[in-house]
Image (cartoon, rainbow, N blue to C red):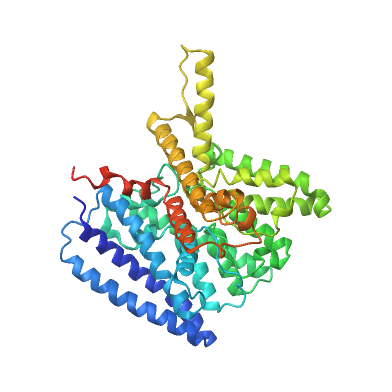
Amino acid sequence: MIRFGLVIYVVALLAGIIALFMIFPFIIALMDGDAASIRAFGITIILNIVLSSLIYFVSKKRVKHKSLRVREGFMLVTMSWAAASAIGAVPFVLSGAIPSYTNAFFETISGFTTTGASILTEIESLPRAVLFWRSLTHWLGGMGIVVLTVAILPFLGAGGVQLVRAESPGPTLDKMAPNITQTAKILWYIYLGFTVLEIILLMLGGMNWFDSLTHTFGTLATGGFSTKNASVGAYNSAYFDWVITIFMIMAGMNFGLFHKLLRGRFRDILKNTEFVAYAAIVAFASLFITGFLIKTYGSFGNALRYAAFQVASIITTTGYATADFELWPAAAKGMLFLMMFIGGCSGSTGGGPKVIRVVGLLKLALNEMKYLARPRGVFRIRLDGNPVKKDFIYSISGFFMLYFTALMVVTLIVTSFGSDIITGFTSALATVGNIGPGFGMVGPAMNYSFFHPIVKWVLSAAMLIGRLEVYTVIILLTPSFWSRR
């Protein structure tokens, strides 16, 4: 049996944590004398703390054992992300920045899931407090709101493993410390360290503190929300482009590798199959596109700058843009389209299927060809130099089946409401993959505001499914999950 009291108990705690983070945009609203935002965030904070405290103390009496079971972990993670998005949307509505709750929820879940898909047609005129909260949802969702909860609330103990495993991006969970609470803290310390470093570098280049904060949130979370209508391209700065490009690539790497780097284990990084493949893909795609852009931008250096930025943005599913790639040559657009099917590394803040899964399936295909040529041969799939268990390959195959099924279903629903097939498919790919921009009517110079409200709710669900690695959400829809056995 699922202990709903325990699930509600932890969700209430997480809701309280979300309310505390709203204090930051509330302070900015006070600094700016923004009465509408002060009222919006003030009311949301007070109501959220009162309600979450009430639910917490009522449910606490019914909670006897705090250790979570596997099924409770799946339910709790899904409910936590849905609740965070529902609560986070309220200030947008109350402030009048996004009057429609449907649009506000879409924008908020896009922030938390680090998708970066937006319904906003005019960004720069919005209050700073609203823009800050919009970007802060990225930063919180990047490393994971549940991972943050586990880091702050050590009482979850062994049960926290179930939560982090259900939320973590990728097929495996790297433990960097003896217990999951310490692992969660290490991840957040690394994340915070990179955040401070990028903010400093952007400010050294002349970007003001507010834009440095918000763009850093979007970069390291691989989210893509900008304070500018033209995204990062509004600055027209090679320095900013390269700083953000480098940090996007870093954010798309497994954060466990940075922990190894800090401990001096350099060989482990070079032996990591996923990292080597990721670096090779980014380098090849950037150079390939550069070759087609030299005539457009006049020199190899400029072409590489724009190519590398867009490649890093798409493969890490960040969604920032410095150019409208819809206007690029077909081959360059084709390469970016392929990047949408790969994603970042496992254990990163990037979305998409993940490099390790693509490499695993490729090795499986190559192995099958070896078997056809030599039926009596014994061949093993190896990653990082070690043989891989069949369970790992089965989980990858199952993931891709569910992933592409989700893409097909979402595409069918979107096109049923009148969208063309390019817009329908790439909007599905951009939301399930947490990428943000697609092609057609959802290209880098467009947004998602024109969709029917039903489509926006479907795409919101698609973002959640993609961020929680498909299994975590889909499993809740199966009869076996609710079985008493």
**Total numbered labels placed on residues in the image:** 0
Relative placement, left or right, of 313 versus 86 is: right
Indicate the position of residue 155 as horizontal and vertical percent values: 26, 59
Tell whether 6 sits left or right of 260.
left
The residue lying at 58 percent from left, 42 percent from top is: 278
- Where residue 254 appears, as percent x and y from the top left, is 50, 47
Who is closer to the viewer here, 118 or 203?
118
Q: Is residue 460 left or right of residue 224?
A: left
When the figure is inspected, residue 115 is found, relative to residue 372, above or below; the finding is below
Asked if one can make out residue 453 in the rendered structure from this viewpoint, the answer is: yes
Pick the quarter of the image with the C terminus. top left
- Closer to us: 23 or 62: 62
Residue visible at 48% across and 82% down in the picture: 37
Judged left or right of residue 179, residue 121 is right
Residue 321: x, y in percent? 65, 59
Q: Is residue 158 visible?
A: no
Q: Nearer the viewer, residue 205 or 76?
A: 76
Image location of residue 194, percent across then percent down: 54, 60
Tell me which corner region of the image, top left, top right, bottom left or bottom right, holds residue 369: top right
Where is 399 relative to 371, above or below? below
